[in-house]
Image (cartoon, helix red, strand yellow):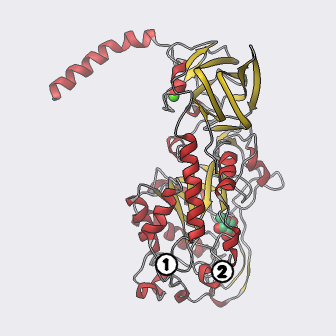
Amino acid sequence: MNLTMNTFSRRTLLAAPLLSFAAAAPPAPYGALPSPRQLRWHEMEFYTFLHFTTNTFTDKEWGYGDESPSMFNPTAFDADAIVKALKAGGATATILTCKHHDGYCLWPTKTTEHCVRNSSWMNGKGDVVRAISDAARRHGLKFGVYLSPWDRNNPNYGKADYVKIYREQLRELLTQYGDIYEVWHDGANGGDGFYGGAREKRTIDKHTYYDWPTTWELVRSLQPNAVIFSDVGPDIRWVGNEKGFANETSWATYDPVGVNGDAAAPGYTRSKEGLTGHRNGSKWLPAECDVSIRKGWFWHEKENNTVKQPRELMDLYYKSVGRGASFLLNIPPDRRGLLHELDVKALAGFGDAVRATFAKNLAAKAKLKASNVRSGSSAKNLLDGNRATYWSTDDAVKTAEVTIDLGHAATFNVIRIREAIQFGQRIDAVAIDQWKDGAWSQFAEATSIGNCRLIRTPANITASRLRLRVTQAAACPVLSEFGVYLESGV
Ligand code: FUL
Ligand code: CA
């Protein structure tokens, strides 16, 4: 076996100079580039939040921090049932509120008594973080942690000691629960709270108090593959609203700015700029669009009638994933410790619709012809379902087109385009035409492309030939995928 491999690799080595002579060099990268961990995250697209804590039992959105730890007492908690429902919805991962602003820890932490160890649930032997992270792994979902930097229970909040405690909590979460794909740092920081009985208002300096770079280094050292989310990244940015959408034009590159044009900090950014990012920003810092399936982030009986239906969830999918961002949907467990039936049903309907819509690329067998082809970057690569392979043009060619001959008339209403973002965000605008009555007729256009651009046409289109035109780009375009779909009705 070894012998064969050696012979093979020696041969490959010998052949290598010849091969590289024949194939053109890949395009030079343009602008800020995604890191390998960001590239992996871009493939996840749709994942979920689980907001669950004492608030679920006190009917609050923000606990004050004086809740009795025994309040947390789900009657029929079932992590597998929760994760299975998320999976049916098409989620690739879930992020649990291991600690929300009230400071209650859903795992038996050594850092505070305000945690599940002192709950009546499972006689204090339970660990929600363990149960959800294990179930996630069993069902093939990744797991992420939300650890609120603001802690309305901790007597030390606002003092230097608390930052040490916060990091210790992070260390516990990042060392005891396997692989973590995302660490979520909320921007809501400081204000009134219980603080060990002080019951007062504590404000902190958002720029200096947490010394975020040190915390991020800790995350890097313990979970090098995890992406870190906050208003300022360093890996993923807040989109700037809690409604689940990015702007029609939204760039993956971004340079966060403080509210007054000064330095940015978590909880202190011009949040509207998160919606669009910055063309040619110096950092690759793509947006994550968070929203709850219900009115609030936590489960409340009275909000059972606010559950978003599949059609609305689909809209949000187009406005988040379809604009190069990710879609982070919260589905809060109820007092039983299960997702509510109404939420499960809506989520399943959404998952079915996404799966059905994108199951079949109607252009999969099309014949493609490009106006310019960089050597070794054939337009065929647009149809192989592989984001690593791409169509590109010669360096000097920034506008180009591909005709897509479907071979027969097809009816569709969705187009999906992906840039090979490992080469940066290069394209400013595209247009798409159909061959109609003996001439090309434009039916769609789009700006920023990035990881994924979904174009939904107002009405179904039936055509047998299409044309994709890159109308403006900062460097020769590098597109990895092109797809044509008929949306399944929801
Ligand atoms: C916000 C928090 O204040 C909310 O309670 C929720 O956790 C949301 C995702 O982030 O800033
Ligand atoms: Ca490809």
Ligand 1 positioned in quadrant: bottom right
Residue 475 or 49: which is nearer the viewer? 49
Rendered image: mark on residue 111: 1
In the image, is residue 337 above or below residue 133? below
**Residue type of the residue flagged with mark 1:** Thr
- How packed mark 1 is, by other alpha carbons closer than 10 Å (few <14, some 14-19, many 20 or more), is some
Report x, y in % for residue 265: 71, 57
- How packed mark 2 is, by other alpha carbons closer than 10 Å (few <14, some 14-19, many 20 or more), is many
Residue picked out by circle 2:
63
Kindly tell me whether residue 184 is visible in this rendering: no
**Residue type of the residue flagged with mark 2:** Gly
Q: Which quadrant is home to the N terminus?
A: top left
Mark 1 → mark 2, Cα distance in angstroms: 19 Å
Residue 393 or 468: which is nearer the viewer? 468
Q: Nearer the viewer, mark 1 or mark 2?
A: 2
* Circle 2 SS class: loop
Report x, y in % for residue 71: 55, 87
Q: 53 left or right of 129? A: right
Q: 331 left or right of 399? A: left
Kindly tell me whether residue 480 is visible in this rendering: yes
User: Residue lying farthest right?
Assistant: 260
Determine the image quadrant of residue 248: top right
- At horizontal 69% and vertical 78% (from top left) the residue drawn is 302
In the image, is residue 320 above or below residue 93? above
